[in-house]
Image (tube, helix red, strand yellow):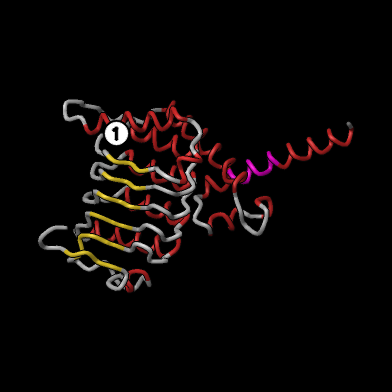
Amino acid sequence: MGADGRVCTKKDLRGVLDEQTTIPRDCTELNLYKGNIGPDGATAIAEALIEAEAGNVTIAKVFLGYNSMRDKGAIAIAEALKVTSALTTLNLRDNMIGDIGAAAIADAIEGNAALTTLNLGNNLIQDTGAGALAQALKGNTVVTTLLLELGNRHNIKDRSITDSITTSLAENKDPTRVRVPKLKNEQSHIQEEKKKYYEAETVVEKTVVEETVAEKTLEDWMKMGVPEDMAKLMMEASKKKDIEKQSQETLEKEL
């Protein structure tokens, strides 16, 4: 914490969470550890961080562990990461963040030139989300610490992904190593679309909500904080799985 700043807690940020005030100008760190703010609270904090950046309020560290923000909250925080220029430490551990949230964070850190420490430990990230993070780190030269321990480690089956992350972090820590961020060309755009489709399939496979995925409308997904293009892909993946299931049932009957 800087000499002229202070750590702001949930008590200091009640107005921010209610979307009535902005982050106090003397705050340099936000600590909402176990604040029970959920996805909506995380979204409010994200919007406040964007406003703080526009108002030249320097926030260097944000601790949001144990807040059940899920993918919706992570997507909002990712939007803030795209514009913050002073945030060096972000802790999102134990937030039930899955592959979609991880992919959103990955997209944000690829172009972020300030963040050095990111804690995503004990979430619900699997190969798809971890792969997105690994790919993002190949174009990022400043992140030196990325924590994916505990729950995620059990979900990430492809060891080449964690090896890639380890390599990128080691390269970023090496002062003699110069890496130029990669430009997103047409080919990488195609790969991005493929990644989004696989993410959508993962959500369809892993969603644990009361209604079935097939019953959700485009509007339902968007209300959950899922971007429109991702929502459409999720619905397409759902239809595909329904067709596969029907085909399998028909085959079993014939046998």
Compared across the picture, whether 112 is left or right of 191 comes to left
Residues 37 and 66: in front is 66
State the image coordinates of residue 47 (x, y, percent, origin top left).
35, 60
Task: Please name the predominant secondary structure of the magenta segment in the image.
Answer: helix
Q: Quadrant of residue 201?
A: top right
The 10 Å Cα crowd at callout 1, few under 14, some 14 to 19, many 20 or more, is many
State the image coordinates of residue 12 (x, y, percent, origin top left).
27, 72
Residues 42 and 19: in front is 42
| Image quadrant where one finds the N terminus | bottom left
> Residue type at mark 1?
Leu
Residues 120 and 135: in front is 120
Q: Residue at horizontal 57%, vertical 46%?
A: 203
Compared across the picture, whether 19 is left or right of 71 comes to left
Looking at this view, name the residue that lies furthest to the right: 254
- Quick check: is 235 in the magenta stretch? yes
| Image quadrant where one finds the C terminus | top right
**What secondary structure is marked by label 1?**
helix
State the image coordinates of residue 139 (x, y, percent, origin top left).
32, 32
Q: How many marks?
A: 1
Q: Which residues are magenta?
A: 234-241
Q: Residue at horizontal 49%, vertical 50%?
A: 227
Q: Which residue is mark 1?
A: 169
- Quick check: is 46 in the magenta stretch? no
Q: Quadrant of residue 183?
A: top left
Q: Is residue 226 above or below residue 145?
A: below
Q: Residue at horizontal 30%, vertical 72%?
A: 21
Q: Quadrant of residue 136?
A: top left
Q: Is residue 62 above or below residue 8?
A: above
Looking at this view, name the residue that lies furthest to the left: 3
State the image coordinates of residue 50 (x, y, percent, origin top left).
30, 57
